[in-house]
Amino acid sequence: MAIAETSGRTESMTRRAGGMSPFVGWFRKLGWRHLVALAALVFALFPVVWIVSAAINPVGSTLTSQQLIPESPTLDNFRALSNTVPYWSWYRNTMLIAGGAALFNTMLAALAAYAFSRMRFRGRRTGLLSVLLIQMFPQILTIVALFLMMDLIKDVYPAIGLGTRNGLFLIYLGGAMGVNTWLMKGFFDTIPVDLDESARIDGATHGQIFMRIILPLVAPILAVVFLLGFIFLINDILIVRVVLGLGNQENWTLGLGLWQFVNDRFSQRWGLFAAGSLLAAIPIIVLWQFLQRYVVSGLTQGAVKG
């Protein structure tokens, strides 16, 4: 009896669905989305798996190490980095330059965004448009000018001239001011001005309002700008090669060092390059895990107002 009733309900549902089985209906409504997500996940993870496989593969050549799962995995490539190149000097330089420049960039952009968002002064609109217009020019257009400028500075102030880490740090300070200022300004505009007015009535200055009221409220966008700037600076090669390429190898960063390391004999040094790349990704992963709760809100809330 129960079997007959269940069969009748199934047939009735099939007729109402136009003759489709439950699986076909589920796949049309929801299943295909799972399939697309799985394909995107495989597409995104395959390069990472390939790099990990190359890093633990004892055969360092790309011509003979095409196995996704090595037969005899080893950590020799990680140990050989210290003996082959000044890898840890590059690592230290990268963390100091990228971390410091990203931090200073974030603070400078926050100060500029606060001024454009909260203050009314002559030339405010022109300044905003100028910052955005300058940012539209590609970075490669500044390479020759940067090289000549740093070469001239070297004769006057050798500590910040061509071939120095300090000079690279100063160049990075203004690298993304335009886009960061606009991104932060949109976020600052979402904060009610009533908070500023209440604090001003209590006797707070602009500096106190900025440090004690605004900055804690805009922590998400600060985290986003710092994270994006940090990732960009770690991966940069073009500017680093122009500024540090002719200097001491001890002053190089990871991007320049690893690129130069495999430039001549890429196929023979692929395992070492993969190992160095994996170690370079660790700070980014740790920073992402620490700041990920701010990223979504920081990227979306700033788009409410322009």
Image: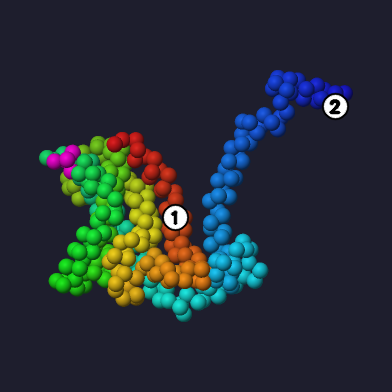
Q: Distance of mark 1 from mark 2, alpha carbons?
A: 54 Å
Res 275 visible: no
Identify the residue shown where x is 51% and y is 68%.
267
Q: Residue furthest left?
A: 122
Q: Position of residue 225 (x, y in %)?
A: 34, 51
Q: Position of residue 3 (x, y in %)?
A: 85, 27
Residue 12 relative to residue 85: left or right:
right
Q: Quadrant of residue 186?
A: top left
Q: Quadrant of residue 247?
A: bottom left
In this figure, which residue is indicated by the disc labeled 1? 288
Check the image and report above or below for 35 versus 59.
above
* Number of numbered tags placed on the structure image: 2
Asked if the stretch drawn in magenta spans residue 187, the answer is no
Q: Secondary structure at mark 1?
A: helix
In the rendered structure, which segment of residues is drawn in magenta? 123-128
Magenta span: predominant SS is helix
Instruction: Please tell me how crowded label 1 is: few (under 14), some (14-19), or many (20+) other residues with Cα within 10 Å.
Output: some
Q: Position of residue 16 (x, y in %)?
A: 70, 19
Identify the residue shown where x is 19% and y is 47%.
206
Q: Quadrant of residue 163?
A: bottom left
Q: Amino acid at mark 2?
A: Ile
Which numbered disc, 1 or 2, marks the residue that appears first in the sequence? 2
Q: Position of residue 236 (x, y in %)?
A: 36, 60
Identify the residue shown where x is 58% and y is 50%.
42
In this figure, which residue is indicated by the disc labeled 2? 3
In the drawing, what numbered circle is on residue 108?
Answer: none
Viewer-proximal residue, 98 or 248? 248
Q: Amino acid at mark 1?
A: Trp
Residue 18 relative to residue 127: left or right:
right
